[in-house]
Amino acid sequence: MEQTKFERYEFKPFIIKAVKDLGFYEPTEIQERLIPSLLKGDSAIGQSQTGTGKTHAYVLPILQKIDPSRSEVQAVITAPTRELANQIYHEILKVAEHSEEEITARCFIGGTDKQRAIDKLKKQPHIVVGTPGRINDLVSAQALFVHSASILVIDEADLMLDMGFIADVDQFAAKMPAKLQMLVFSATIPEKLKPFLNKYMENPKFVQVAPEQATAAKIEHWMLPSRHRNKINLTETALLAFNPYLAIIFTNTKKKADEVADGLIEKGLKVGRLHGDLSPRERKRIMKQVKDLEFQYIVATDLAARGIDIQGISHIINYELPTDLDFYIHRVGRTARAGNSGIALTIFEPSDEDALNRLEKMGIDFKHVDLSKGDWVDLEHRNKRQKRIKQADATDKKAKTMVRKPAKVKPGYKKKMQSEVDKIKKRQKRIQRKNK
């Protein structure tokens, strides 16, 4: 198997094996700058955006330090959202499963049965991942014992602060050892966060990583509105319009992957599938079929597709956007390799607005498209109409401030005022047009 540059960190053999299986050959900048310090036991603040590889920058050193013979909590990892907590938890499992000695991890998030969580804690796990409120509940209920943990991770700390979760973290962090290795990751370090950091951290290592170009230069990012159409039909039309050399269609769950694969197979497309329910033998068979070009389309989940290097992927279809936007970068990075070009198409719902805005802030420039009779047509930017409405509202407000209300109200004054407002608005529009 190809050598990996992670070997220079002298990780335990099971971690090196996991890293190879995940397809990580070269550390990202934040991993390169943080892993040696974290292995030494230093506290650290990592300022970085999504897509810089920060999760593995702390997950790998934590797993290196776990002593499987001690049946007690040794590391606590907090995240502001259930989705992110789950994501981190699954990343830990993917590495820990390579260990010959059992390393246990548990994920505790709000919206789940608290009593069931308490029952699971009859035996304390080595690593706890979760949302601050639920972790604090379990610590307060004396079901979870964090006094033995020497590592505390606070991921997305600025979001944690915005959501009011820092108080929860503070409560259970106070029960942890005085000599605590604390790792804080945040896109920004707000002033209001600093008192909390100063309370628990003494001379932490500070690493700031500017986001590189989010994705390869030769990837075109397209977005296609679903507009309440049947998404499987829409995906089929998009695939036929692209006629790709090889396309991967990404879904968030195994269930959805099967649903999409079955739907496309019913339409006569030859589709492979990659997800966590496949046995190693089935997975090997599918990979051989892919390499032999038996499929033009593969439906996959993020976890199944991670670490698999498939040559010649010309198109990526996001059947749904990932909950953790790091995975958008991982997904689209499978095309446009080795100087080739590629297209990443996202089929989006109105509920995806926030995620799309965040991706655009990361520097991803989307081309807005639709399908008409099987052909691609360009659309205006999805926010253009909103911008027009805002501009019109602003003009309206300004015009109203410029019209004087008469001292004495006479019959028909409202009509006269509106007429004045309309005149001013017309004048404003003429000025705007001249200035363009």
Image (cartoon, rainbow, N blue to C red):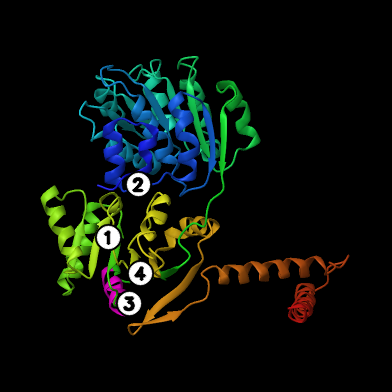
* Separation of marks 1 and 4 at Cα, in angstroms: 33 Å
Q: Secondary structure at mark 4?
A: loop
**Could you tell which of marks 2 and 1 lies nearer the N-terminus?**
2
* Separation of marks 4 and 2 at Cα, in angstroms: 38 Å
Within-10-Å neighbours for mark 4: few <14, some 14–19, many 20+: few
Amino acid of disc 4:
His
Q: Which residue is mark 3?
A: 242
In this orientation, which residue lies closer to the viewer: 31 or 51? Answer: 31
Q: Main secondary structure of the magenta part?
A: helix
Q: Which residue is mark 2?
A: 24
Q: Is residue 153 magenta?
A: no
Q: Residue at x 34, y 65 (%)?
A: 316
Q: Residue at x 16, y 75 (%)?
A: 268
* Separation of marks 2 and 1 at Cα, in angstroms: 14 Å
* Separation of marks 1 and 3 at Cα, in angstroms: 19 Å
Instruction: Tally the marks.
Output: 4
Could you tell me if the residues under marks 2 and 3 are in contact, i.e. CB atoms within 8 Å? no
Q: Measured from the top left, where is residue 49 in percent x and y?
A: 52, 47
